[in-house]
Amino acid sequence: MALTLRSSISFIGRVDSNSHKTSDDLPVSMTILSIAEGYNYKAASSCRRLRAVNSSRREVVQQREEGHELLHSLPAAAPHGGGGAAASGVPVYVMLPLDTVSPEGRLQRTRALAASLAALRSAGAEGVMVDVWWGLVERAGPGQYDWGAYEELVRMVDRHGLKLQMVMSFHQCGGNVGDNCRIPLPPWVHEEISRNPDIVYTDRSGRRNPEYISLACDTLPVLRGRTPVQVYSDYMRSFRDRFGGFLGGVIAEIQVGMGPCGELRYPSYPETNGTWRFPGIGEFQCYDKYMKASLRAAGIAAGHEEWGHEGPHDAGHYNQFPEDTGFFRREGTWTSDYGRFFLEWYSGQLLEHGDRVLAAAEAVFLGTGTKLSAKVAGIHWHYRTRSHAAELTAGYYNTRNRDGYLPIARMMAKRGAVLNFTCMEMKDEQQPGHAGCSPELLVQQVKQATAAAGAELAGENALERYDEAAYAQVVATSKAAGLTAFTYLRLNKNLFEGENWRHFVGFVKSMREGGRNKGLPKSDTTRSELYVGFITSANKKPELEAAS
């Protein structure tokens, strides 16, 4: 059975990006049916109507003193200084599917994608985010870049009056939460890994992780005569040259990947083959020969050569709890002189890596008018313990008496990059009690760190959520933190299901209006909102016709 939805109300057509007005070229029926066809929908028994409306346009605190034993429960900060987002509203972006570009370098599901962009534009979304996969673009060989599919996407997004956040994804896709496809690093990089396995991260048992090149190789010519940072820089420079006319316009932001999942961290909690399970503490990733050489040099420089022989012997395994280990327990090795030395070296290496890669990005994109950003993981489990073990293994030296996010925020601020943080939708009460979670306190701490450092803060949800409670939490967090933008995970067929879509539209409106509206009503007789709901007998338009 084919369904046709007729309406005198236009859904969206060509868009004037300055006025945000739409022409009447594309009826609502075409958009909804295109999305349904592209995502293999089943027609619902009830009809829904949509209507477009114009949208409205878009902290300094004292630094905490180190040495105080706090649970990072900090006083509320003044509004963030980055752009006055809290006062004028927070623009919402939506992540596109991970496989938007196929392994062969083609833009996939173009009809459904165009319809989805039209729907997002009518909902008031600012734009979309897409991963620009290193493994796809430079797959043919070193310096051979295929930007064709991404150029097609940029032009499509531009036609719909939306903006783009484009992620320089120098990591592998596959093996982590939410990964529904596999996109490895370029084949020629894997050839180098086969020749020299030590160029990827390695744990204590010798397990190699091919998600991302080890940061200890940043300045070493391990990729066919080039260093990894040179490779990343050449890739970004080629991107800039190809898309220069769009930078600062439709391409509003470049997010620079700096680790697994595109996040500035070590791959300390890999899900591949069940290696790690929530809420395990993870493991230190410092056992490739280049990391071991760096640790030895640091031990000698500290006057304790013995400290540089290897990483902690008592740090446990991926799925243990802090109190099960000698290193992370309440008064464990992490509090000793050796423990502090090791954690400062381990986290310091990550900070230096982030600074090197962001410096390269800054040099490439300076003057283009495009924002830079980088992503930090929201590791909220075991946050209520003294050692914060899961954060430590990931490279964030954040404990009960040390702020691990302020140095990261300062590094980002130095490079003019927005700090993008996850788990904005989570509440403490929703987490399992045995895991020591506190996403709310963690977000509050990161907010304080960015404010103190003078960095801008943006956010994402960590898991797919469609319920009003999650949206309300994001709205409340964005108001308190003064987010400059929020990126919603993720565009898929579930988002367009009736109640899910209605909740999302209300959320976007609330974010853009500074949190004043908490959602859309169940009915809309005034036709004042973009609305998804059930047709009632009081409102006969649009009409639904069924043709078998």
Image (cartoon, rainbow, N blue to C red):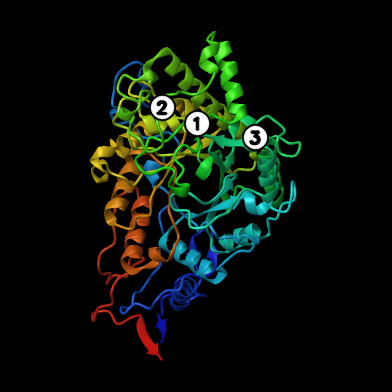
Element marked by disc 3: helix
From the image, tell me which residue sits under label 2: 315
Where does the image place residue 419, in percent across and percent down from the top left?
A: 47, 37
Q: At 28% across and 27% down in the image, what residue appears?
A: 71
The spot of residue 342 in percent (x, y) is 48, 20
Residue 264: percent from the left, percent from the top?
51, 36
Circle 3: residue type: Ala
Disc 2 to disc 3, how far (Cα)?
34 Å
Where residue 204 is drawn, which disc sits there?
Answer: 1
Return the disc, 2 or 3, that comes first in the chain's sequence. Answer: 2
Quarter of the image with the N terminus is bottom left
The reply to whether the C-beta atoms of the residues labelled 2 and 1 are less than 8 Å apart is yes
Image vertical order of residue 534 relative to residue 518, above or below: below
Residue that label 3 marks: 360
- Residue that sits furthest to the front in the current view: 205
Closer to viewer: mark 1 or mark 3: 1
Q: Callout 1: helix, strand or loop? A: loop
Residue 171 visible from this viewpoint? yes
- In the rendering, at what x and y percent does residue 335 appear? 37, 17
Q: Is residue 212 left or right of residue 233?
A: left
Q: Earlier in the sequence, mark 1 or mark 3?
A: 1
Camera sees residue 176: no
What's the residue at 30%, 71% (across, down)? 533
* Viewer-closest of 463 and 509: 463
Of the image marks 2 and 1, the number of the one nearer the N terminus: 1
